[in-house]
Amino acid sequence: MPRRLPHWARPGDAPPTIVDDAGAANKKMLTDLARDRLHTRGTAHLPLDRERAQRELTEGERALRDSRPRTRRWKALDKLDSEVDRARQRQHEATERLHDAEQALVRAPADDARSLADWLARGERGERPDPTLYERERERDAARLLVEAATVEVDRALERRFQHIQSKREKMLEDALGDVESARERLLAQVRALPGFRQTLAAARETLLWIAAYPDQAPSFGFPTATALGLQEPVQRTLQTSARIEYAALLQALEADVTAPAEAFSNDQKHQLGIVEAKTPLREALWDSDEDNIRWKKSELERARRLGEWQDPHQLAAEIRDMRP
């Protein structure tokens, strides 16, 4: 009697429906399981409280809120900074405790095995040692909860600091601006005092050379009005140029170096400082009908009219021809 071929080998016969149903069900089960695992992996450590999740700060936000000024200018801010520092210290201690608890949990199975082996080696005399794994898990969970509580404390301290700065920002801006102006004036005074000190040094040098050459005339050397007497080596080494630089130009550069930190800001910094500058066609393209462009042309026209009181009117007319609104 010939063998009957299986269904999958017989032409024209379809496999039983129950096989299709089982395969489809198994495939769906695997898909659902994979989706659940991905969901659990992404949400297992998120708090169940949605409001709490919204309140929690990222590490980047904490770092920004904990940024400190270079100078300790405000006592109230110093007090809040101390609160943040204490909360940070407690968080650090709690994190170290969690690390120790996790290490103890990792060692627990091996420790339990050794304890039980020692008990067996003693002939099972005495009470059988209890396993410590579950106790170590509870200690780990308690340490983890302590870290979360310490982190909440840090966030609260940072929130109080944030709210204080937000409410006092205008006054703090005024204080900081006053500090900048005061520092600039003190530094400018020092820069403007340099020519007098330099002249004293030059006079002392002339006296030295006079007494050395007397009664002959002292030979000349260098350029007294130039930086470093016009010597190329010190200028090249310090200013990265071989050109002769007059001392007056060096003083102007020093004054500009004092003024720039006090007055020059990027557009983003100006926006944060509340500095509003009128738009002009010198900075950006403007339509002829733009109010800022019309206002600028009127201002330039008025300035040209005032200059016309002592300049050639024909020359001024050529300069302001394109400025009429």
Image (tube, rainbow, N blue to C red):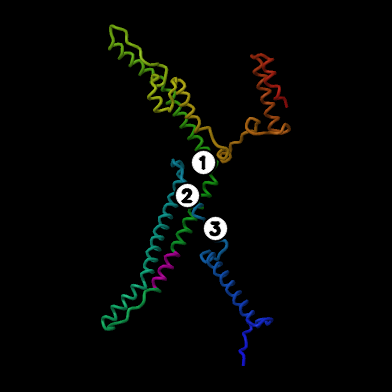
Q: Whole-Å distance between the Cαs marked 2 and 1? A: 17 Å
Dividing the picture into quadrants, the one containing residue 12 is: bottom right
**Outermost residue, left direction?**
122
The x and y percentages for residue 213 are 28, 10
Please say if the residues under marks 2 and 1 sit with CB atoms less than 8 Å apart. Answer: no
Is residue 293 rendered to the left or right of residue 54? Answer: right
| 306, above or below 28, in the image | above
Q: Residue 66 bears which disc, if any?
A: 2
Magenta span of residues: 135-145
Q: Earlier in the sequence, mark 2 or mark 3?
A: 3
Question: Is 286 included in the stretch rendered in magenta?
Answer: no
Q: Which mark is residue 236?
A: none
Numbered mark located on residue 172 in the image:
1
- Residue at image coords 59%, 71%: 31
**Is 83 in front, or is 138?**
138
Q: Residue furthest front?
A: 1
The residue under label 3 is 55
Q: Earlier in the sequence, mark 1 or mark 3?
A: 3
